[in-house]
Image: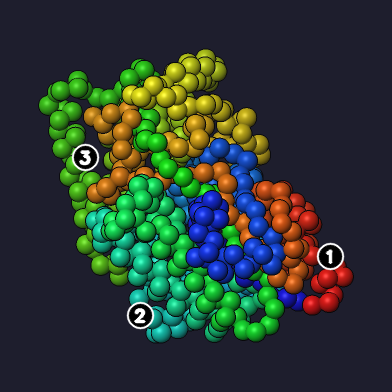
């Protein structure tokens, strides 16, 4: 059986891969030897937890139950999601059950690490560097013995300034390449899955620098540098795998493009009378609340920037962090007068404050349809200061999802024009409806947003050679990877095997 490497480059934009193909020899050579196209997701909600839960399970959100970084539980309370919240088996379990050795490294939604994998290093949902993020724990000792502290979250900006973060990305991509090489060379595997997020971070934070094209600018090449680093990373991994033929799949869950503007959805809901805050706009109470928010935000930003990374595991599991997050998200909202609100990190999620479902709900279940109609009319009528209409559709959750767990989904999902708008994470009550999009702990705004099409490249003895292919749905990736490893996908998987991506049997027999 031919071994397989799955190389996941988060949010890598296929148009940038094409633009810089001469500087990306590994991706380009694989494209020429196999197939090249793009991935796609059939829901206009391009958020990491939802997309990667779909990829990891081969089933859709209504079945796996994960929709956002923070989502509502059965009691109506919001919690941060992690791998343990995914309802269903991960695709690699079927490989292990069939006797294949599987290694999974840094993939989202893998904390706590799955005992079904031969070895695993948890991804971004893990709280920090700690023996508990790897299985077996001996792997943690081996890696930290060879490289020092494992850099789990160092790729994220964490309150750094713009110039410093560009240097951090460069350093962390190089360090990750060394660790990936070591894992590929030293561990036993039949299927190895590697995930890197440097390209996604560069696109989010330096897209406008790239687009401006200023020669000699300190940041205009940051996006390109990270794509080149990812290409070199894969080249090193392929060499570390040895001389035997292997199947290689390169993919991203979505693409990227320029951000038009940030949107403060709670401001829109407040202005239209759907959400209310305690106190009058200029009252002492409101001024005190804003001062408290500033203090809490400053504490969080300082912790992100100055707290030693070795303490992240304890800090991220602390009650204080959870309290601050909840306080910042709900502070000042008068639930007795609030019918709808935005929460989480969603691309455009709206929750209704339903009586009997939400802790302080006031909307009667029979009022749901009429409220959704009001909200839809308001959102469709939004206009930017330049007169653009940012919303092209407002979807009920039951129109996007089906399955036993759609109650965890937001009531409404906004579909943005060209996917070029994103809710701001600093939705303070005194901030404008439209403006620069700041992350919770950032000192400069993001300038890149998601796009529906991701990258898909594959080559190897079992892969067809085609100049063009149909889009590869995210839900079809797990069945593809299982089939590449000679395992029939379980019947409960909702994705399909893309037989058109496989080489004819007679060609495989010759290799």
Check disc 1 and report its element: helix, strand or loop.
Answer: loop
State the residue position of label 2: 148
Does the CB distance between marks 2 and 1 fall below 8 Å?
Answer: no
Residue 316 position within the rendered picture, expressed as x and y whole percent measured from the top left = 34, 58
Residue at image position (38%, 81%) is 147
Q: Report the residue marked by disc 1.
A: 504
* Residue found at x 83% / y 77%: 510
Residue at mark 3 to residue at mark 1: CA–CA distance: 61 Å
Please name the residue shown 36% across and 36% down the image. 262
Q: Neighbour class for label 2 at 10 Å: few (<14), some, many (≥20)?
A: few
Residue 288 visible here:
yes
Left or right? Give the position of 322 relative to 43: left
Residue named by callout 3: 293
- Residue 344 as seen in the image, left or right of residue 52: left
Asked whether disc 3 touches disc 1, contact meaning CB atoms under 8 Å apart, the reply is: no
Between the residue at mark 2 and the residue at mark 3, the CA separation in whole angstroms equals 37 Å
Nearer the observer, disc 2 or disc 3?
Answer: 2
Q: Please state which of residues 428 and 98 is positioned toward the viewer in this rendering.
A: 428
- Whether residue 312 is visible, yes or no, is no
**Gap in angstroms between the C-alphas marked 2 and 1:** 46 Å
Task: Please state, as top left, top right, bottom left or bottom right, where the N terminus lies in the image.
Answer: bottom right
């Amino acid at each position: 059986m031919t071994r397989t490497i799955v190389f996941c480059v988060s949010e890598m934009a296929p148009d940038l891969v094409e633009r810089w193909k001469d500087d990306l020899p590994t991706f380009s050579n694989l494209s020429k030897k196999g197939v090249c196209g793009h991935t796609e997701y059939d829901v206009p909600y391009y958020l990491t937890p939802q997309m990667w839960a779909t990829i990891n399970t081969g089933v859709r959100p209504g079945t796996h139950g994960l929709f956002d970084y923070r989502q509502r539980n059965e009691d109506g309370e919001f919690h941060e999601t992690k791998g343990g919240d995914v309802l269903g088996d991960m695709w690699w379990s079927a490989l292990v059950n069939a006797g294949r050795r599987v290694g999974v490294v840094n993939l989202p939604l893998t904390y706590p690490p799955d005992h079904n994998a031969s070895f695993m290093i948890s991804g971004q949902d893990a709280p920090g560097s700690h023996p508990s993020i790897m299985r077996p724990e001996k792997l943690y000792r081996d890696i930290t013995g060879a490289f020092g502290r494992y850099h789990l979250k160092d790729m994220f900006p964490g309150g750094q300034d713009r110039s410093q973060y560009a240097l951090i990305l460069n350093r962390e991509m190089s360090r990750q390449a060394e660790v990936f090489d070591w894992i590929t060379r030293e561990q036993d595997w039949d299927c190895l899955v590697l995930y890197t997020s440097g390209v996604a971070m560069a696109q989010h934070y330096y897209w406008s620098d790239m687009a401006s094209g200023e020669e000699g600018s300190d940041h205009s090449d940051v996006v390109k540098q990270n794509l080149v680093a990812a290409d070199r990373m894969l080249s090193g991994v392929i060499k570390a795998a040895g001389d035997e033929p292997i199947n290689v799949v390169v993919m991203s869950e979505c693409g990227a493009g320029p951000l038009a503007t940030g949107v403060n959805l709670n401001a829109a809901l407040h202005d239209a009378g759907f959400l209310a805050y305690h106190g009058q706009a200029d009252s002492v109470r409101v001024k005190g609340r804003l001062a408290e928010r500033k203090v809490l935000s400053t504490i969080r930003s300082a912790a992100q920037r100055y707290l030693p990374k070795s303490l992240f595991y304890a800090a991220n599991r602390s009650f204080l962090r959870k309290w601050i997050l909840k306080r910042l998200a709900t502070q000042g909202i008068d639930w007795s007068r609030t019918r709808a609100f935005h929460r989480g990190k969603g691309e455009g999620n709206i929750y209704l404050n339903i009586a009997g479902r939400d802790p302080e709900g006031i909307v009667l279940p029979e009022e749901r349809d009429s409220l959704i109609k009001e909200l839809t009319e308001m959102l469709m009528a939004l206009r930017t200061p330049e007169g653009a209409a940012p919303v092209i559709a407002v979807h009920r959750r039951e129109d996007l999802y089906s399955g036993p767990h759609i109650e965890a989904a937001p009531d409404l999902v906004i579909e943005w024009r060209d996917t070029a708008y994103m809710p701001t994470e600093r939705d303070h009550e005194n901030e404008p409806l439209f403006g620069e999009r700041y992350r919770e702990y950032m000192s400069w705004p993001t300038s890149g947003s998601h796009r529906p099409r991701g990258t898909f490249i594959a080559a190897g003895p079992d892969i067809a050679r085609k100049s063009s292919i149909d889009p590869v749905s995210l839900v079809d990736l797990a069945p593809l990877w299982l089939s590449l490893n000679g395992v029939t996908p379980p019947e409960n998987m909702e994705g399909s095997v893309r037989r058109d991506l496989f080489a004819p049997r007679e060609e495989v027999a010759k290799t």
